[in-house]
Amino acid sequence: MKDTFKHKGLRKKLVETLIDKGIKDKAVLNAINSVPRHLFMDSGFVGHAYVDKAFPIAAEQTISQPYTVARQTELLEVKKGNKVLEIGTGSGYQAAVLLEMGVVVYTIERQNELFKKTSKFLPKLGYRPKKMVFGDGYKGLPEFAPYDGIVVTAAASIVPKPLMAQLKVGGRLVIPVGDRIQIMTVITRTSSTEFSKKEYGEYRFVPLLEDKN
Ligand code: SAH
């Protein structure tokens, strides 16, 4: 588990790529510059860690493309001390980026293999989410609601109602919506009963799987 000068140099280049692609939020760019993404991938794939691409992890899942992580984090518009729920822990990379920003992170994963692996791995790097839960993210995590932000890192065919209900007033839900191609959608809770919606371009994610139980 080494983070060398070479890795740091590659990360700096990645950050420059993200700036070229339009990421502006300094706190997000600093976080990407700090998180050792190569450690979130199997060692054989370390050479791929700092190109702006998604990559396979365990259980047929992927670590999201750095641009996508940066863009979703930027769209959350969160600051230090805010409370964020992540759906789809996966490798833990998105959670680590939020933790670097001083966000209080709650995260849910429905693949047991990944849940076990990542719950052991993140604390080893010093990243400590407030809660890591094995379960179905469609339902959110009502026991700790409301949240300043909710980020869904898998493709949803609809916006799950329970997630909207778990936002604070002023809170934002960042979710890729669609089947084959997804539209990055931001739902903002404008009052206890009202929500607004904005769309931010096309993405491709692995599907958010609904629990049949
Ligand atoms: N945020 C992750 C990206 C992982 S890919 C990262 O930074 O690496 C999406 C993840 O969502 C996968 O791990 C998948 O198993 C998980 N997932 C799919 N459906 C889910 C659901 N209903 N609840 C929770 N997690 C889910």
Image: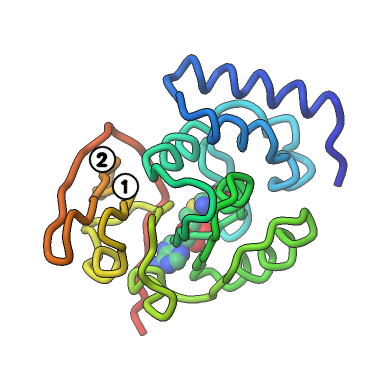
Q: Secondary structure at mark 2?
A: strand
Residue that extends furthest to the left in the rendered view of this protein: 194
Which residue corresponds to mark 2?
Answer: 183
**The disc label shown at residue 176, or none:** 1
Residue 147, percent from left and from top: 38, 63
Sort mark 2 into few (<14), some (14-19) or many (20+) by Cα contacts within 10 Å. Answer: some
* Crowd tier of the residue under label 1, counting other residues whose Cα lies within 10 Å: few below 14, some 14–19, many 20 or above: many
Q: Position of residue 108 (x, y in %)?
A: 49, 68
At 31% from the left and 55% from the top, the residue drawn is: 171
Task: Tell me the amino acid under the disc marked 2.
Answer: Ile
In terms of depth relative to the viewer, which is nearer, 24 or 109?
A: 24
Q: Left or right: where does residue 71 sit relative to residue 102? A: left
Color theme of the render = rainbow
Check if mark 1's residue and mark 2's residue have beta carbons within 8 Å.
Answer: yes
Spatial separation of the CA atoms under disc 1 and disc 2: 5 Å
Q: Residue at x 44, y 46 (%)?
A: 78
Residue occupying the point 87% across, 41% down? 2
Residue 127: x percent and y percent? 70, 56
**Count of numbered circles on the image:** 2
- Asked if residue 198 lies left or right of residue 89, the reply is left
Please tell me which residue is depicted at 62% across the width and 26% down the height of the picture: 51
Q: Position of residue 45 (x, y in %)?
A: 72, 38
Q: From the viewer's perspective, is residue 41 above or below residue 28? A: below
Label 1 or label 2, whichever comes before in sequence order:
1
